[in-house]
Amino acid sequence: MKIINKIITGSFTVITLLSTNVQADTLENVKAKGYLSCGVHTGLPGFSSISTKGVWEGLDVDFCRSVASAIFSDPKKVKFIALNAKERFTSLQSADIDLLARNTTWTSSRDISLGLNFAGVNYYDGQGFLVSKDLNVKDALELDGATVCIQAGTTTELNLTDYFKANNLKYKSITYDTAEQTIKGLINGRCDVLTSDQSQLYSLKLKLKDASKYEVLPNIISKEPLGPLVRHGDERWFDIIKWTLNVTLLAEENNITKSNVDKMKKSKNPVIKRLIGENAITGEKLGLKNDWAYQIIKNVGNYAESFDRNLGKNSPLKIERGKNNLWNNNGLMYPMPMR
């Protein structure tokens, strides 16, 4: 039996499903249908978008493929479901998808009120501003009286309000349902500035014909820890998603890559042996094969490989690792020990 409640979170309404019993086993359901249903962005280069060859790609897409590799030893057993910001939570709550991996910010209201769990952070971001150079603005504090394009159903609306109130600035907002509509609003002159997560601003800038005429301001006005989500009530599934992310970070920390993972299986290092070697210890407890972590690395790679090809030095975005470096390289990514 399920009780359906409406909860207002920020500026949007979501449906909360309060179940009177523990929900079905997600892993067994995924195995039965033979693929993972993964909710992703409708089209955000670097995180989730369709290439010119018709293939899904991006940091979040890689994460979905990592989960599929852990379950099926096959990264192709994923069905990608494109969702806008308003659809994403209800799609997960209603079990239309098994996992949401869609650049979503971890906040208290989302964590507490929606019946969902964040499984970790796969990208540390912050809200910024994209402006036309014709405005001759170099700092967000110069945006008094500006018209701002915003995507509805996101944390950016409240962050923007807080920032402008705190700095005694005035603004007018124009909201759109999708990120693509916000960038069109900026191009067509409906707004002076577009605000969103800074990584998204770099992605949207790629879509501009005259990208050189626009710039991302240096100001970061919020904390936006982005990560994958699952439903409450299925602890094993929660553990699988959480530890899939952790494996990609542990692999980078121990210099295990797609190209050397077979060789590294023979390592005498006890940490590596517990991760991918003969002493791998967590597969059976998760309902997976004991080589599940090996399959993630072999099929998709470690976190650095995914970051570099989608967002970093090997991508059109060229975003610096910064806060998304490992803890031992001045970053915030800190994998939990597998033992």
Image (spheres, rainbow, N blue to C red):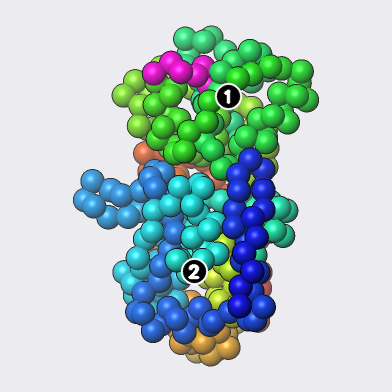
x and y percent of residue 299 in the render? 36, 70
Q: What stretch is highlighted in magenta?
A: 188-193
Q: How many labels does the image show?
A: 2
CA gap, disc 1 and disc 2:
33 Å
Lateral position of residue 111 relative to residue 257, left or right: right
Residue at image mark 2: 95
| Residue 225: x %, y % from top left | 63, 49
Q: What residue type is labelled 1?
A: Ser
> With 276 as the anchor, is 329 left or right in this view?
right
- The residue that appears at 67% across and 48% down in the rendered structure is 8
Q: In this view, does 50 lie above or below 113?
A: above
Q: Is residue 268 magenta?
A: no
Q: Is residue 20 above or below residue 42?
A: below
The main secondary structure of the magenta stretch is loop
The residue that appears at 60% across and 48% down in the rendered structure is 13
Choose top left, top right, bottom left or bottom right for residue 78: bottom left
Picture layout, residue 138 above or below residue 339: above
Whether residue 211 sits left or right of residue 124 in the image: it is left
Sequence-wise, the earlier of marks 1 and 2 is: 2
Residue 277 vs residue 214, the one in the foreground: 214
Quadrant housing the N terminus: bottom right
Residue that appears at 28% across and 48% down: 51
Q: Is residue 192 magenta?
A: yes
Q: Mark 1 points at which residue?
A: 173
Screen quadrant of the C terminus: bottom right
